[in-house]
Image (spheres, helix red, strand yellow):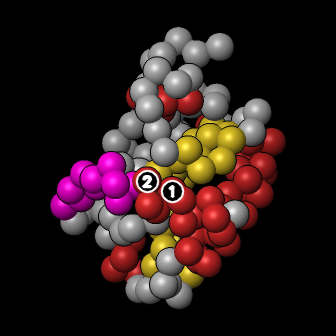
């Protein structure tokens, strides 16, 4: 099913380990290991398409519905005003959305340096979100 083309397809195929949050037949959600804020989740379609808006209509429709319970869990798990959503899509040529707990618009600033999170902190974040799902 996957040619292992993008790093996201390799994560979905299980070739690269990830901190999975949720999965269905069309989408895979996992922690960003370079989070801009603790609780930063990526939602990726299993269909390998570079630009989000080139996805088939049913994927665009279903992607937000797939993300909704994850966003609600992020809001429960972290001290934030809400779960923000961002689409940039420049780092990896595979459509994806970012779900980030935010208190201000600056919390979605992707130009800040993003150090890699430790395995311990990622595991703790994964457990917090899964417990709230």
Asked if the residues shown at circle 1 and circle 2 are in contact, with their CB atoms under 8 angstroms apart, the answer is yes
Label 2 sits on residue: 123
What stretch of residues is rendered in magenta? 113-122
Residue at 53% across / 87% down in the picture? 81
Element class at badge 1: helix
- Which of the pair 109/55 is nearer the observer? 109
The span from disc 1 to disc 2 (Cα, nearest Å) is 5 Å
Q: Residue 52: say if magenta.
A: no
Q: Is residue 85 visible?
A: no
- Which of the pair 50/71 is nearer the observer? 71
Is residue 20 placed above or below 130 in the rendered structure?
above
Relative image position of residue 29 (x, y in whole percent): 59, 47
Residue 104 located left or right of residue 99: left
Is residue 108 placed above or below 14 in the rendered structure?
below
Categorize mark 1 by other alpha carbons within 10 Å: few (<14), some (14-19), many (20+): many
Residue at 61% across / 78% down in the picture? 76
Categorize mark 2 by other alpha carbons within 10 Å: few (<14), some (14-19), many (20+): some
Relative image position of residue 99 (x, y in whole percent): 53, 62
Residue at 46% across / 79% down in the picture? 102
Element class at badge 2: helix
Q: Is residue 16 visible?
A: yes
Label 1 sits on residue: 126
Residue 17 occupies quadrant: top left
Magenta-colored segment: predominant secondary structure: loop
Residue at 39% across / 55% down in the picture? 122
Query: If the image is split into quadrants, where does the C terminus sit?
Result: bottom right
Residue 30 located left or right of residue 107: right
Relative image position of residue 112 (x, y in whole percent): 22, 65
């Amino acid at each position: 099913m996957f040619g292992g083309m993008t790093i996201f397809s390799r994560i979905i195929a299980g070739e690269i380990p990830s901190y999975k949050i949720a999965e269905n037949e069309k989408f895979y959600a996992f922690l960003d290991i370079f989070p801009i804020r603790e609780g930063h989740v990526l939602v990726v379609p299993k269909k390998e398409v570079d630009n989000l808006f080139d996805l088939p209509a049913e994927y665009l429709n279903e992607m937000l519905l797939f993300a909704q319970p994850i966003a609600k869990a992020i809001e429960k798990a972290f001290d934030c005003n809400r779960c923000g959503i961002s689409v940039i899509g420049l780092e990896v040529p595979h459509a994806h959305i970012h779900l980030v707990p935010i208190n201000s618009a600056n919390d979605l600033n992707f130009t800040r340096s993003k150090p890699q999170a430790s395995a311990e902190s990622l595991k703790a974040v994964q457990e917090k979100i899964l417990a709230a799902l």
